[in-house]
Image (spheres, rainbow, N blue to C red):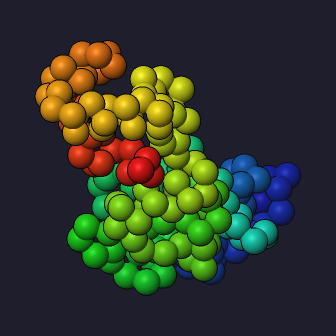
Amino acid sequence: MRSNSTLPERTCLRCQQPYYPGHGLQRYCSPHCRSRTPTRRKTPEERFWAKVDRSGECWLWQASLSHRGYGATRHSGRTINAHRLAWIFTHGTVPEGLSVLHRCDNRRCCNPAHLFLGTPKDNTQDAIRKGRLCCGEAINFAKLTPEKVRQMRELHRSGVNASEVGRRFAVTPSVALRAIKGQTWKSVR
């Protein structure tokens, strides 16, 4: 061992032998000891929760976001929404056909207490109830209004077919028929 080094003598973390490091960051006496030292890798769950700020009511995802503003991460070889992975780590798998929804409407939130399971229909109804999804004439490109829909239904009851009704109101026959049948514009009586 060199005794003329300006750095103090250290003890190898692996073999416990004294050595003089070649530079200040060296922790092992040789490459052999460094390569034989077992390192504990973090589990996917530990790596996930390390990227979540749990200091507030909503636990915010601190890493990458999807183009829609949801937390996004890689898990088992595919990209997954962070709130969905939080649910999986906390409660287990998400049943087929269900989505993980937010009570708090914060897309970055991963707090399991703010998450619940629901169908796509539940998700849409939740969005409408909370004012996040426009419907009817609130959609800025809607061609119909409640009054026009009433007129369309009255015309159809008087014997005018859906194609003609659609032409008169500048919509396709299928749009006209869905409005007439009440498949769309359900709130209009």
| Position of residue 99 in the picture relative to residue 156 (left or right) | right
| Position of residue 172 in the picture relative to residue 51 (left or right) | left
- Residue drawn at x 42%, y 23% is 143
Residue 35 seen? no
Which of these two is toward me, 90 or 129? 129
Residue 86, placed above or below residue 62: below
Q: Position of residue 52 (x, y in %)?
A: 64, 64
Residue 162, placed above or below residue 96: above
Q: Quadrant of the N terminus?
A: bottom right
Which of these two is toward me, 155 or 50? 155
Q: Position of residue 6 (x, y in %)?
A: 85, 52
| Position of residue 164 in the picture relative to residue 5 (left or right) | left
- Residue drawn at x 78%, y 59% is 3
- Residue drawn at x 37%, y 31% is 151
What number of labels is visible?
0
Picture quadrant of residue 170 = top left
Q: Position of residue 30 (x, y in %)?
A: 54, 61
Picture quadrant of residue 107 = bottom right
Residue 111 seen? yes
Which of these two is toward me, 54 or 77? 54
- Residue drawn at x 83%, y 63% is 8
Residue 24, placed above or below residue 8: above
Residue 63, placed above or below residue 147: below
Which of these two is toward me, 47 or 16? 47
